[in-house]
Amino acid sequence: MKTVQQMLRDKSVVLSVPPTATVYEALVLMASHDVGALVVLEQDRLCGMFSERDYARKVILQGKASKDLVVSEIMTPHVFTVEPDDSVEACMAVMTERKVRHLPVVDGGRVVGVVSIGDAVKALLREQQFVISQLEGYITA
């Protein structure tokens, strides 16, 4: 069973913004790294998540301007997290139950990564493909 820590091996640094960053600055960072969400950190402490969904629902639909608005005004403050030793299946369960697409990975109170629903699906597919190939090898042997 694959763990969160194993999923993080394929990922680079944790992208984050402070709560005082403008929404526009956060969007530029997201676009430049082709990600759908950022961790919001205040002095290395997790205080929220900012996602494309936050932007669409709390800025665009309400007619606000992203250059005048700070991230703390629209971020999701109550963040669900996972730990490095959690399983991929546990991540999928949290994402499904809580209707979130990104989970910060916290180890000892420090954010060490972020996993997305796409990361989890890819990991599960790879694991299933491995099991299938092992079973096919067993059957044909």
Image (cartoon, rainbow, N blue to C red):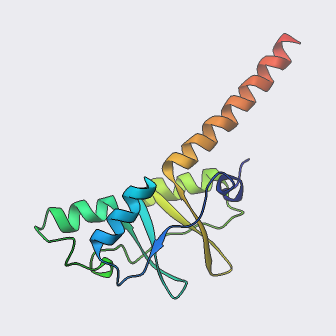
Q: Is residue 99 visible?
A: no
Residue 139, quarter of the rendered image: top right
- 62 left or right, relative to 101: left
Residue at left 65%, top 67%? 83
52 shown above or below 1: below
Quadrant of the rendering where the C terminus is positioned: top right
28 shown above or below 116: below
Name, please, the residue furthest toward the right.
Answer: 141
- 128 left or right, relative to 51: right
- 18 left or right, relative to 5: left
Residue at left 12%, top 67%? 62
Toward the viewer: 119 or 132? 119
Residue 121, quarter of the rendered image: top right
Residue 135 point in image, percent of width and height:
78, 23
31 shown above or below 23: above
Residue 27 point in image, percent of width and height:
33, 64
- 15 left or right, relative to 111: left
Q: Is residue 68 visible?
A: yes
Name, please, the residue furthest toward the bottom.
Answer: 43
Residue 117 point in image, percent of width and height:
49, 50
Residue at left 41%, top 57%? 32
Residue 78, quarter of the rendered image: bottom left
Residue 122 point in image, percent of width and height:
58, 41
